[in-house]
Amino acid sequence: MKEIYVDNNATTRVDDAVFAEMRPYFCELYGNPSSMHFFGGQVQKKVDEARNRVAALLGASPDEIIFTACGTESDNAAIRSAIEVFPEKRHIITSRVEHPAVLTLCRNLAKRGYRVTELNVDGAGRLDLQELKAAVDEDTAIVSLMYANNETGVVFPIEEIGAIVKEKGALFHTDAVQAVGKIPLDMATSSIDMLSLSGHKLHAPKGIGALYLRKGAGQGAARPAGKGADRPHSPCQDQRRWCRAAPQYPVARLRVRRRGGDPAAFERKGDLCLVGECLHVGVAGAFPRAAGHGGAVHLRPRLDPFLPVALQYR
Ligand SMILES: Cc1ncc(COP(=O)(O)O)c(C=O)c1O
């Protein structure tokens, strides 16, 4: 008996054309796009091109696309950023049929004191919009409802939902992991503030996702402070913001060299200096030093409020 694969909602085979286009970036053009030198710059151009393509698929603007590692991370970043933007709001609305990427986070937040409403669905998997209307209030930070269900295939009436959510001033996030590439989307005319997608559901490899974040949504502050190779802003902007985000960290007086700037303009304060994403420690023992990093500490995981901190200091 020949077995055939019919589980494309779980994951898809990498398309030959996708593989052919990505191949050089594993073995030849492997520079870090954040690096200031030529090897990074040529990859950065490709990252920008990829961002443009994702934006076009969604009818969005490129600076509204944040690359992540997967749909799960996009969902988490969306919900976490919403509660950070509205610290005074303690209510989150979702549904009982969301993917665990959303539901597990919401249930964890409920344990931390958030009021979480899980909307019901009927026997055909449909939401009751009256129930949503009754649930959303001034205390609601975010409503997170999926576009298309990964098990039942039910498509929620996203624009009707968006209209209800917007009336109360909450942010509207949709997990569109099962919709992107199957249902035409146009963020320019949509009420969606944030939208998650995942590459491996549409013939890209695992390990690639994106979060659409509407410009100005949540007072413009919902943007996670970068992720991996994703550089929607200049390194200078991002690093200044990270420094502000972590005032307890001893980099508050760091100054950074602009991408492509004169290497002689490399700036240094005391015994710390920052090159690209690395904090270099000038005097052994005077400042925290990352084990095994020869004095260069990767700042991003330390300062990004959305990523776990993995550094061990001696
Ligand atoms: C609706 C939905 N959301 C989120 C995810 C998680 O996506 P990823 O595997 O990229 O983390 C999935 C994956 O099955 C999904 O079907």
Image (spheres, helix red, strand yellow):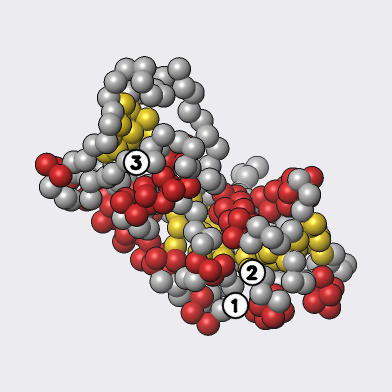
Q: Residue furthest right?
A: 123
Give residue 176's position: percent from left, percent from top.
60, 64
- Residue for badge 3: 253
Question: Secondary structure beneath disc 1?
Answer: loop
Q: Amino acid at mark 2?
A: Phe
Q: At 37% from the left edge and 50% from the top edge, which residue is drawn?
A: 240
Instruction: Name which quarter of the figure residue 152 lies in.
Output: bottom right
Q: Are marks 1 and 2 in contact (CB under 8 Å)?
A: yes
Q: Nearer the viewer, residue 66 or 198?
A: 66
Q: At 77% from the left edge and 72% from the top edge, which residue is drawn?
A: 137
Give residue 26's position: percent from left, percent from top.
32, 40
Q: Locate the N terminus by quadrant.
A: top right
Give residue 260's position: percent from left, percent from top.
18, 50
Give residue 117's position: percent from left, percent from top.
81, 61
Separation (CA) of disc 3 from disc 1: 41 Å
Q: Which mark is residue 191?
A: 1
- Residue for badge 2: 172
